[in-house]
Image: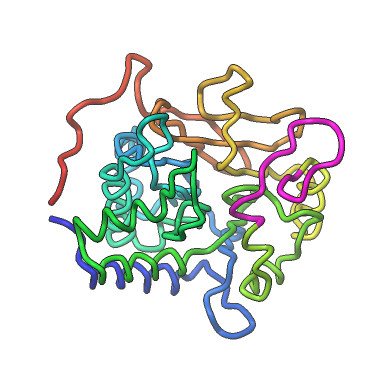
């Protein structure tokens, strides 16, 4: 069965009232999730872009599902669950709906143990385009055909309800990258006051070359400033998605200490990958893969009308 609008609003309520989320100065849900005093391991899933097999395989990998049921772990999805990013498939939207509704089910089932950070693809905005394809608009039209206008409105509420950053023991997680020259904890909590900070956290990309970064890029100095202003340990991991580094020759979907930036991790969990995710416990980050190298799992998901 498909998810109903009233269930989406229940998801929105769970997201907004999550006990780990700090209210901002106006009493609204802030931009920050605080796990600093939460003694639980976390699983971190990168950009899925419609990779429903990967999402299900990770949740069911090893004993993850049982530990979620027992409230022993926290599952973090780093944003961009929707919009197939494969060449020739960018107008394919069925996988996006599958991922979206699986995210809804996970939050309804496991409540605050499932956290989803907002990414740049978590929108219906027409300006969102990849290879000149307006994927936000394409997804909206698909939902209008297969669901309803009220379903779209509820999903838009879900997008707008999402936080932008998670802090935990020696780790910082956001979708795209740090804010240039950093930002304080208070500024992240009150991020609704600064649309430019919102834009940077969901859009900034790594500056891979020497020289001065553009206003759309960040480098190691911005990460260090972010860690400093957040008053996190100097050796904290800074974890993002958004910017896959396939050009390095590493096709795993996990890139550590990228271009020499110590403890900077980029993770991508999209369709061609083997379901990579990070397991973080006691300040240690372990790479895991939910799908065997022989290829994709087949027939493990049934389309729900």
Q: Position of residue 283 (x, y in %)?
A: 63, 43
Above or below, 124 relative to 43? below
> Residue 143 at what x, y percent from top left?
26, 57
Who's the residue at 71% across and 45% down the image?
Answer: 236
Q: Residue furthest front?
A: 132
> What residue is rendered at 75% in x and 34% in y?
262
Q: Quadrant of residue 232?
A: bottom right
Residue 233 covered by magenta stretch: no
Instruction: Please state the extent of the stretch shown in magenta in the rendering.
Output: 200-218
> Residue 204 appears at what percent x and percent y?
66, 48
Residue 305 drawn at (x, y percent) = 13, 51
In this view, the residue in front, 238 or 120, is: 120
Direction from residue 83 to residue 204 in the image, left or right:
right
> How many circles with numbers are drawn on the protein?
0
In the rendered view, would you say 46 is above or below 1? above
- Residue drawn at x 59%, y 54% is 202
Image quadrant in which you'd find residue 212: top right
Does 206 appear in magenta?
A: yes
Direction from residue 255 to residue 303 in the image, left or right: left
């Amino acid at each position: 069965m498909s998810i109903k609008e009233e269930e989406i609003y229940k998801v929105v309520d769970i997201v907004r009232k999550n006990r780990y989320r700090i209210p901002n100065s106006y009493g609204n849900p802030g931009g920050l999730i605080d796990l600093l005093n939460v003694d639980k391991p976390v699983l971190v899933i990168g950009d899925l872009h419609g990779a429903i097999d990967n999402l299900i395989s990770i949740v069911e990998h090893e004993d993850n599902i049982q530990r979620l049921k027992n409230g022993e772990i926290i599952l973090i999805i780093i944003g961009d669950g929707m919009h197939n990013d494969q060449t020739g498939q960018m107008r394919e939207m069925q996988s996006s709906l599958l991922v979206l509704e699986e995210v809804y089910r996970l939050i309804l089932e496991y409540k605050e143990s499932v956290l989803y950070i907002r990414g740049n693809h978590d929108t219906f905005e027409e300006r969102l385009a990849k290879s000149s394809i307006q994927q936000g608009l394409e997804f909206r039209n698909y939902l209008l055909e297969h669901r309803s206008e009220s379903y779209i409105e509820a999903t838009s509420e879900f997008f707008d309800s999402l936080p932008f950053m998670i802090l935990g023991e020696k780790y910082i997680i956001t979708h795209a990258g740090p804010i240039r020259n950093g930002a304080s904890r208070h500024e992240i909590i009150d991020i609704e006051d600064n649309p430019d900070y919102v834009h940077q956290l969901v859009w900034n990309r790594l500056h891979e070359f020497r020289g001065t970064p553009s206003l759309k890029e960040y480098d190691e100095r911005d990460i260090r400033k972010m860690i400093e202003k957040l008053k996190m340990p100097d050796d904290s991991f800074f974890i993002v998605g958004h910017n896959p580094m396939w050009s390095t020759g590493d096709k795993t979907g996990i890139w550590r200490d990228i271009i020499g930036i110590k403890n900077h991790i980029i993770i991508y969990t999209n369709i061609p990958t083997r379901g990579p995710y990070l397991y973080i416990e006691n300040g240690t980050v372990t790479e895991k893969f939910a799908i065997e190298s022989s290829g994709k799992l087949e027939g493990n998901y049934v389309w729900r009308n």
